Structures are given as C-alpha cells and as structure tokens.
Amino acid sequence: MQLLLIRHGLPVPIEGHADPELDEIGHAQSQHLAEYLASERIDVIYTSPMHRARQTAAPLAERLGMEPIVEPDVAESDKDGTSYVPVEQLKAAGDPRWREAVAVSDWAEEREPLDAFHERVMAGIERMVDAHAGQNVAVFCHGGVIARYTATILELPWERTGFFYPLYTSVTRVAASSSSGIRSILTVNETAHLRGTGLPTGASDGERRSQSVAQRRSKRWSWVTWSGVRSSSDRTPRSFMVRAISSERIWIARSTPASPPAMRP
C-alpha cells in the first residue's frame, strides 16, 4: 500500500489555543493540491481532527466524493497548546520558539511529551497500513507527524525529531507492506502544485538555496548514494539511496528489517 502523508496549508496565527483555521492562502494551497491529486487513485482519506488539517483535506474529498476519516492519533504535538504561529513567521521575527520541535533538547514543555507523541503517531499510521493493504491512503496531518514517522523509518537517532521540514500542502509518499514490514520513503515534499502560483510553501531561505543548488547540478536528475550509521555507539552500516533529485520531488528508497518501524527508539 502507499501512504500519502500531506501537511496542512498555511494557518492563521492564533492565541488561546493551538487549533487555528486556514488562512486564505492556505485555502488556495489546498485547492491546488486537490487539482494535483484528483487524477490519482485515492482509496481512503484520513485527516487529523485539527481544523487546519480537516480544511486542507476538504477540497480533495469533495472532488473525489469521499468522507474523510478523522484519526486523532495523527494530530500535532501542540494539540493542547495555548498558541499557534507559523514557524516561518517565528523565524522571521527572531522568536526562538521556532526551534521547539526541531530537536529533543528544544522540545517545548507545553507540547505533548515526545515519547507519547512518537508512540501515538506510530500506532495511528501503522493501523492504517494494516487496514488498507494494496490501497492508496491520503493522510492529512502535520509537519511533526510526517517528520516523526519518516525519521523512524530511517532509524535516525532519537535526538533527531526529523530529517526535513515538511512544507505547506506537501506530499510525502511511503510504500508500506504489513506482511513484510518493509517501509520505503518514495518521495519527500512534493510541492509541484504550488509552482507558478505565487503561493508560499513555507520554505526557509536555507531550504530555497538548497533547492536551487540541486536544480543547478542537473537540468533534470541527480543521482546520489550514501551510507551512514545510527549513532557513535551503533556502528552497524545502514545504507540509504537517494534515487533521484529533481526540482519537484526527492525520491528515496530505504529497506527496513522485516518488521514495522519500531514503536520506541
């Protein structure tokens, strides 16, 4: 089966709780996403219960005539927070809160404890894998959820909460087999639907520079392979292959042992 892990569109800043609705830009991003995915086979749509995810899912669900299934376990770690400000706005203002979900050392106290968040996300997504063999499942959720699940597939150190920053309405695809336990990351941060629209993706200056470098290296594709180790105390080689990098997608293949991603690090 294939998971399409989709981050919500741009929300409005809000105080008093951390469950904002989409900004007008976020609604526009969601419409472009719906057009982008409308021609694909989507068998099931799941959504986080948070407003920004549900509103992002709505245009695609309407086009496909589907009723999204609300899954509480793919809500963001700030679901019980007291405010929400988009990360790029925090960074632009020099507000240190933008770092609070980037690493364990900066994890904010008002967020759900990382152990609990990790177990909840893994349990929720793995239930989808078990329930939808052979199907394509769209999951409208959050940057932290996508980062946590993909970091676990790659067996990153627990201190790393993720290896990339999911952009607004980006699609990250994972091939998952409930029988073999193999999870392979197929694409990361698909945002081709926003190209030429003038709508923001939420990418930082550094990410935009990285994308420009990748585009300059090849008119279409760059092929890269590398190997890594999990930590200084674990010297078991783990091979990763970036199959192709383009201006639209980053393709990654990763073979895991014959068991689902670990529930705990």
Image (spheres, grey):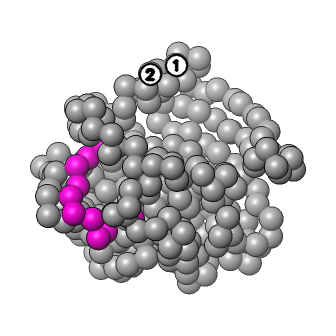
* Rendered view: 129 above or below 211: below
Residue, disc 1: 213
Q: Residue at x 75, y 47 (%)?
A: 231
Residue, disc 2: 209
- The majority secondary structure of the magenta stretch comes to loop
Q: What element carries label 2?
A: helix
Are the two marked residues, 2 and 1, in contact with CB atoms closer than 8 angstroms?
yes
What's the amino acid at mark 1?
Val
Range shown magenta: 77-87
Q: In this view of the protein, which residue sits in the foreground, 49 or 131?
A: 49
Q: How many labels does the image show?
A: 2
Describe residue 201's horizontal placement relative to residue 211 as left or right.
left
Describe residue 178's horizontal placement relative to residue 78 as left or right.
right
| Residue 59 visible to an observer of this rendering | no
* Rendered view: 241 above or below 105: above
Quarter of the image with the N terminus is bottom right
Q: Where is residue 22 in the image (x, y as percent from the top left)?
A: 18, 56
Q: Is mark 1 on a helix, strand or loop?
A: helix
Describe residue 128's horizontal placement relative to residue 256 as left or right.
left
Mark 2 nearby-residue class (10 Å; few <14, some 14–19, many ≥20): few
Q: Where is residue 62 in the image (x, y as percent from the top left)?
A: 24, 69
